[in-house]
């Protein structure tokens, strides 16, 4: 608001109080109208300007009143003001600001905004500026937009003066600002007329007079104004003392000769790490040399350059130094350009009406580019007067005047315009920061998407807080999202931010060091209250204590403004505050000239089921935009033009999204179902989230119970013929190591996507680090080479995850694909491929064969040393694979040392030969041969490319090569290394690639480091059909033989083809079982059989999957997976061989061992309570719980049959005797002599009877089981507990019949089916969901998901 003018306050108050309806008035902005209404209490007046326009004003906005009952004109100011120009033209208007009459050269400026910068630009000294934009003053004035400490222009002429300062940081109106600075303003003038005069007749002198003057008196005043030609103004504006400005980081020292320097130039030099010594215009060359500068800057300034003879002489000394002084680079702007030209011997001349504005096109003759420039000068250099040593570099496209020169051999150059004032930007980095509850990630992502859709190239960096729920307002809770967008190709998220948007004090404190010097801060003042300052441990409010003086700070009470915008929606304060981020987004959209359309569409889609929240977000978004528009928060509104990108159809994508699409694409192209087993872990979880949406593509996602289960399930799925994939990050990679080794040993496809984060251990879950290269290369025991790939950008994740799938499937081996955390979460525009352009993936399964054909040899290899992929269900190919070393070709278990060596080299050679199937490495940027090679891998691509481009531009012979294939390396890597004198390897680790390069190529590289149907088979199989040709190697007398025999006997009765059966085992004696079965089988790793079986069954529900495990295997290391498979109810049969001892490791006690057991590890007896497998199984929501023993053949067979008939996970505990380490442990239950008294054989619907003659029974006393003797006739059979397999409570009691014989609480041990329940199986649910979603949505269309919902075309 315009502030009251104290001088004439009483006079004004009297006049304004006397206003009546019908009075004619003129507003202080010069608009004429009639009073249509009054509210004297509120001091308001309604003014009718036309039949339809009536506006309410504060009375203070009225400049003059013509009483309805008066013929005379009365003025609140002295309106009888006239300006008499040299042409004799006089203009009548009103004065504002100071009333001090002034004369000067009349110039016009075509800028729409920036009047405050113009007034304070020393180059306008001696001039009266006519603003051609019709409304001036509407964003008020502030301390941030000054170009110097005072107003230098003599006066300002406007069409209409706005009395309201709408800018959020306006400190006072233009009127009072001028008054305070003793500068006159002249309003209500037809400025177009003045411009026509000047353009027609040339530069003119003029005079603003206040009061009644005759024409002759006015003429005299005008003629008293000195002409600009020959006028020297520099001595007036130049500082008298030396002044120093120091950047945070100093790279150069620049001496700036002050002919009228602007603060913005100083700010930009500081941003470029220049220490500046600003010296008076008359400092001598000798004095300047003594300052030992790296460069000299000749500033802008006012007046005629040709009269500055001393300055010209000084510059001549500087460009022609004697032997004692070096040649110092010199750069001039505006007057500095003219003086440099004069020093070269050129001539200057007065332009007819000069160049004053912020939109002048200048052609750069060297690049051919047209630059839109800011200009302010009345003189120009005559190009014909330039000596031959000087070339013209720039010309003005309006009138062809010279705009830039450069010495042909020496480092001297200058431009006539103000490059620092250019309103069109090539690239901008914005860092949005706020509390983790402020929606910063959404804000940044939306801004990025909109920028991409509008044609900018971009790169983003989301920076999540490390803690999930740190207290709001604290530093630990700060979340950031950096967007680097531009009209040029963008390869990085930006080193430093140009703009920092902060929602609270903590966000500022945590991110200020990421803002470039002189950068823009947009601060939510609502986040800088005492509470926020305390929480962020900020002692004083930085918005008030001057500590941000080196930045452009814009304070906006976003909290309050958002709240105001959402009034009436019925939302609570907290809900309203959740829309603050949309206000910010709208404001920044306005600042960078971007439309709201994309975000409005997104909000409509996101909140379509919640109209109130939708309305709140839309209102906040629009409020932010309109706020920027209305209050002109920034003096400049920036524009970043579309980038020149490769033509095609683009979409916006994150690295993790690209990885998901690559997996689906590989699945579709290879025609293999995708199985994705994953455990949630930051920052890889998004891949799981994303893939879970694509059920209609047949995608099976399995959220495993842990990392080991995740990778094991993928291995199981892969064995079944699916594209088996797992993802992980950080310590999850450690946990997967053993399983990856298993897949390498078995030579089975497996894709591991490792989204790398900082470590060790849990480390920095949300932070990026290239920390897993050596883990991927060597992080497994034994010689276990895997293919290792790395993606280099968000969209590049598609290319290399797809390639990982191709190589894994075609080479039958695990591939680890490394993604840097920040590219997985980062975004960029993606020129997505057509489906027809995707590389083919050749997958052929081994085909069925009859018994008269050659036997199948699972480890027979082709020319690439790749074995055949024979999947369960294929007739005649039944075979077993596992972690034990296999005999070459046959795949039988082999301990032959020579065979092991041969197999080790074969597996390594297979990976090495891959080098022939991958592209050669090429130089990405820079020279092919030269001084330095920058060799990188993974997410450092953008940084290295950008650095190389800059170094090459500076003349260095530098090349950049980037590795995407890390094992094996591209075959020509050695050649490329040899073409450079030095190899520098920058990595975000302590040096991992460098170790590989030094080791492999003996190059002294320098590290740069920061820390898968046949008709139903009716033929009945015989037991021998299920026996493999492997020798059974258990200890003589081991209970395992009995179990194997009964399984082989029962299987033919089950009606399942043997090629459809898969036996999966873990580690232990019993785990050899699959080798002895002529079915498909997998001997896997310790405790993980249930996880692998889960993956296999989900991906191949047609298979009959069995798990063979022991008490040591599944009840210790594998207990988690054991519980999980029971809970999920996967349709798998588990045969738990319980011998209460570790057999394979030579006799240590197991979790099932009884207390007091003496073993090698418990020589004084175990003090560890035994685990009750059936109680655990029932407690895990198992749906089939049963017990049997190796020595009761009929019972064992019947239980195997029952287990198999159950739909869901069937758990059959089998007491198995280990003759070697725990012989006769179950003797009381298995031997004839004791069995009848100790065993309780359960039958559904029958009473619980036991004893030699069934003379004993169990009755229930309430819920207490009581053992009764039927002989004593106190109880009969009718009193006994009737077994109900479906009664969970009674089943629970039965599992607790666990005491040992002869103990006080002993009850006979139950055998048989204790519990069975019908429950949908997990594998069925997964697949039915896929079918349902596919029916609902239709079969997935790969073209459709590659393109996404929004694309744009670049031509
Ligand atoms: S150690 Fe025990 S369980 Fe293992 S094979 Fe020998 S007898 Fe069987």
Image (spheres, rainbow, N blue to C red):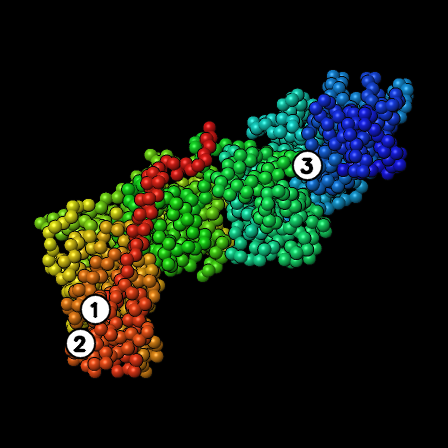
The first of marks 1 and 3 along the sequence is 3
Q: Position of residue 896 (x, y in %)?
A: 20, 63
Residue marked by disc 1: 1246
Out of 851 and 24, give the one closest to the viewer: 24
Q: Residues within 10 Å of mark 3 (few under 14, many from 20)?
A: some
Residue marked by disc 2: 1254
Quarter-wise, where is residue 1107 in the image?
A: bottom left
Give the residue displayed 45% in from the left and 35% down from the top.
1350
The first of marks 1 and 2 along the sequence is 1
| Side of 3 where 821 appears, left or right | left
Give the residue displayed 10% in from the left and 51% down from the top.
1019
Q: Position of residue 1111 (x, y in %)?
A: 28, 69
Is the distance from the Cβ of mark 2 to the nearest ligand 1 atom less than 8 Å? no
Q: Secondary structure at mark 1?
A: loop
Give the residue displayed 38% in from the left and 47% down from the top.
692
Out of 742 and 508, give the one closest to the viewer: 508
Q: Nearer the viewer, mark 2 or mark 3?
A: 2
Q: Position of residue 515 (x, y in %)?
A: 61, 47
How many angstroms separate mark 1 from mark 3 (CA)?
87 Å
């Amino acid at each position: 608001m315009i502030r009251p003018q104290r001088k004439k306050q009483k006079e004004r108050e009297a006049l304004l109080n006397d206003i009546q309806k019908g009075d004619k008035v003129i507003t202080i902005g010069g608009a004429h109208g009639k009073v249509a209404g009054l509210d004297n209490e509120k001091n308001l007046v309604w003014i009718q300007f036309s039949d339809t326009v009536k506006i309410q004003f504060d009375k203070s906005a009225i400049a003059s009143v013509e009483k309805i009952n008066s013929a005379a004109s009365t003025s609140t100011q002295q309106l009888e003001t006239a300006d008499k120009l040299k042409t004799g033209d006089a203009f009548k208007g009103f004065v504002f600001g100071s009333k001090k009459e002034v004369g000067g050269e009349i110039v016009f400026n075509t800028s729409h905004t920036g009047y405050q910068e113009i007034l304070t630009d020393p180059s306008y000294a001696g001039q009266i500026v006519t603003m051609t934009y019709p409304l001036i003053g509407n964003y008020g004035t502030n301390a941030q937009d000054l170009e110097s400490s005072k107003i230098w222009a003599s006066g300002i002429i406007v069409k209409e003066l706005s009395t309201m300062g709408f800018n959020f940081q306006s400190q006072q109106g233009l009127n009072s600002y001028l008054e305070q600075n003793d500068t006159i303003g002249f309003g209500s003038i037809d400025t177009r007329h003045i411009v026509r005069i000047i353009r027609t007749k040339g530069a003119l002198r003029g005079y603003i007079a206040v009061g009644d003057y005759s024409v002759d008196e006015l003429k005299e005043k005008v003629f008293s104004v000195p002409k600009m030609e020959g006028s020297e103004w520099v001595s007036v504006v130049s500082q008298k003392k030396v002044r120093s400005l120091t950047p945070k980081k100093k790279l150069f020292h620049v001496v700036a000769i002050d002919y009228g320097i602007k603060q913005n130039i100083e700010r930009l030099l500081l941003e470029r790490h220049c220490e500046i010594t600003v010296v008076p215009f008359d400092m001598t060359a000798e004095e300047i040399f003594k300052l030992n500068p790296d460069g000299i800057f000749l500033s802008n300034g006012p007046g005629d350059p040709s009269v500055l003879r001393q300055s010209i002489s000084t510059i001549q000394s500087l460009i022609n130094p004697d032997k004692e002084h070096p040649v110092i680079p010199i750069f001039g702007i505006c007057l500095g350009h003219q003086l440099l030209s004069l020093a070269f011997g050129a001539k200057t001349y007065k332009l007819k009406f000069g160049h004053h504005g912020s939109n002048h096109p200048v052609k750069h003759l060297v690049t051919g580019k047209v630059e839109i420039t800011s200009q302010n000068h009345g003189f120009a250099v005559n190009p014909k007067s330039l000596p031959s040593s000087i070339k013209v570099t720039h010309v003005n496209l309006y009138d062809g005047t010279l705009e830039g020169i450069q010495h042909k051999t020496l480092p001297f150059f200058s431009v006539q315009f103000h490059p620092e004032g250019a309103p069109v930007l090539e690239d901008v980095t914005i860092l949005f920061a706020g509390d983790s509850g402020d929606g910063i990630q959404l804000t940044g992502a939306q801004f990025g998407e909109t920028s991409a859709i509008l044609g900018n190239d971009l790169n983003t960096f989301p920076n999540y807080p490390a803690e999930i729920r740190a207290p709001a307002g604290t530093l630990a809770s700060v979340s950031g999202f950096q967007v680097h967008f531009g009209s040029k190709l963008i390869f990085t998220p930006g080193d430093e931010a140009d703009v920092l948007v902060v929602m609270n004090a903590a966000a500022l404190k945590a991110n200020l060091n990421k803002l470039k010097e002189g950068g823009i801060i947009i601060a939510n003042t609502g986040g800088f209250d005492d509470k926020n300052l305390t929480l962020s441990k900020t002692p004083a409010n930085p918005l008030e204590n001057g500590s941000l003086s080196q930045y452009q700070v814009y304070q906006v009470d976003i909290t309050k403004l958002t709240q105001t915008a959402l009034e009436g929606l019925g939302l609570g304060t907290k809900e309203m505050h959740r829309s603050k981020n949309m206000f910010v987004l709208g404001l920044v959209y306005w600042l960078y000239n971007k439309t709201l359309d994309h975000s409005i569409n997104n909000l409509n889609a996101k909140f379509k089921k919640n109209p109130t929240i939708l309305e709140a977000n839309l209102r906040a978004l629009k409020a932010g935009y309109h706020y920027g528009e209305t209050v002109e928060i920034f003096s400049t509104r920036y524009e970043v033009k579309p980038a020149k990108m490769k033509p095609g159809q683009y979409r916006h994508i994150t690295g993790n999204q690209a990885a998901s699409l690559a997996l689906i694409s590989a699945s579709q192209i290879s025609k293999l179902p995708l199985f994705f087993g994953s455990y949630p872990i930051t920052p890889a979880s998004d891949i799981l989230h994303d893939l879970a949406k694509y059920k209609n593509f047949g995608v099976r996602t399995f959220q495993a119970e842990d990392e080991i289960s995740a990778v094991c399930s993928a291995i199981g799925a892969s064995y079944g013929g699916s594209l088996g994939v797992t993802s992980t990050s950080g310590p999850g990679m450690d946990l997967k190591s053993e399983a990856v080794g298993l897949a390498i040993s078995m030579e089975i496809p497996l894709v591991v996507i490792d989204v790398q984060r900082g470590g060790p251990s849990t480390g920095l879950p949300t932070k990026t680090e290239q920390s897993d290269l050596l883990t991927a290369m060597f992080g497994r025991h034994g010689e276990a080479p895997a293919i290792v790939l790395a993606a280099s950008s968000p969209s590049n994740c598609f290319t290399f995850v797809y390639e990982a799938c191709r190589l894994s499937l075609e080479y039958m081996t695990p591939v680890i694909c490394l993604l840097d955390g920040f590219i997985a979460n980062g975004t960029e525009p993606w020129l997505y491929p057509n489906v027809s352009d995707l590389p083919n993936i050749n997958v052929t399964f081994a085909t069925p064969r009859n018994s008269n054909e050659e036997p199948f040899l699972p480890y027979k290899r082709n020319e690439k040393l790749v074995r055949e992929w024979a999947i369960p269900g294929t007739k005649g190919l039944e075979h077993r694979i596992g972690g034990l070393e296999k005999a070459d070709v046959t795949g039988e278990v082999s301990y032959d040392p020579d065979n092991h060596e041969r197999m080790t080299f074969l597996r390594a050679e297979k990976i090495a030969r891959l080098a022939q199937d991958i592209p050669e490495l090429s130089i990405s940027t820079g020279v092919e041969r030269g001084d330095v090679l920058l060799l990188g891998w993974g997410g450092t691509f953008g940084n290295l490319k950008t650095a190389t481009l800059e170094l090459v531009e500076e003349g260095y012979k530098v090349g950049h090569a980037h590795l995407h294939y890390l094992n094996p390396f591209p075959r020509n890597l050695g050649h490329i290394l040899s073409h450079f004198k030095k190899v520098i390897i920058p990595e975000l680790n302590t040096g991992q690639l460098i170790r590989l390069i030094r080791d492999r190529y003996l190059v002294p590289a320098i590290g740069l480091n920061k820390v898968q149907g046949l008709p139903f088979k009716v033929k009945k199989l015989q037991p021998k059909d299920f026996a493999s040709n492997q020798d059974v190697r258990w200890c003589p007398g081991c209970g395992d033989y009995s179990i194997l025999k009964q399984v082989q006997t029962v299987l033919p009765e089950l009606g399942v083809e043997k090629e459809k059966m898969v036996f999966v085992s873990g580690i232990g004696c019993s785990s050899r079982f699959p080798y002895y079965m002529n079915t498909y089988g997998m001997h896997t790793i310790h405790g993980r059989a249930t996880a692998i079986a889960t993956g296999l069954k989900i991906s191949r529900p047609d298979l009959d999957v069995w798990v063979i495990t022991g008490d040591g295997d599944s009840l210790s290391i594998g207990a988690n997976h054991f519980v999980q498979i029971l809970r999920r109810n996967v349709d798998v049969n588990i045969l738990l061989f319980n011998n209460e001892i570790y057999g394979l490791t030579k006799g240590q006690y197991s979790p099932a061992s009884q207390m007091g057991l003496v073993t090698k590890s418990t020589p004084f007896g175990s003090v560890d309570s035994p685990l009750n497998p059936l109680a655990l199984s029932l407690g895990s929501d198992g749906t089939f719980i049963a017990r049997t023993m190796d020595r009761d053949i009929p019972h064992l067979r019947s239980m195997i049959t029952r287990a198999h008939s159950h739909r869901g996970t069937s758990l059959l505990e089998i007491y198995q005797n280990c003759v070697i380490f725990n012989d006769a442990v179950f003797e009381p239950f298995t031997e004839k002599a004791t069995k009848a008294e100790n065993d309780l054989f359960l039958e559904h619907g029958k009473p619980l009877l036991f004893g030699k003659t069934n003379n004993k029974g169990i009755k229930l006393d309430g819920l207490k089981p009581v053992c009764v003797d039927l002989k004593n006739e106190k109880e009969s059979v009718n009193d006994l507990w009737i077994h109900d397999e479906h009664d969970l409570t009674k089943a629970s009691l039965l599992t607790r019949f666990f005491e040992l014989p002869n103990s006080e609480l002993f009850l006979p041990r139950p055998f048989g089916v204790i519990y069975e329940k019908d429950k949908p199986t997990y594998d069925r649910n997964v697949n039915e969901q896929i079918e349902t979603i596919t029916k609902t949505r239709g079969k997935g269309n790969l073209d459709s998901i590659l393109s996404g919902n929004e694309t744009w075309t670049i031509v």
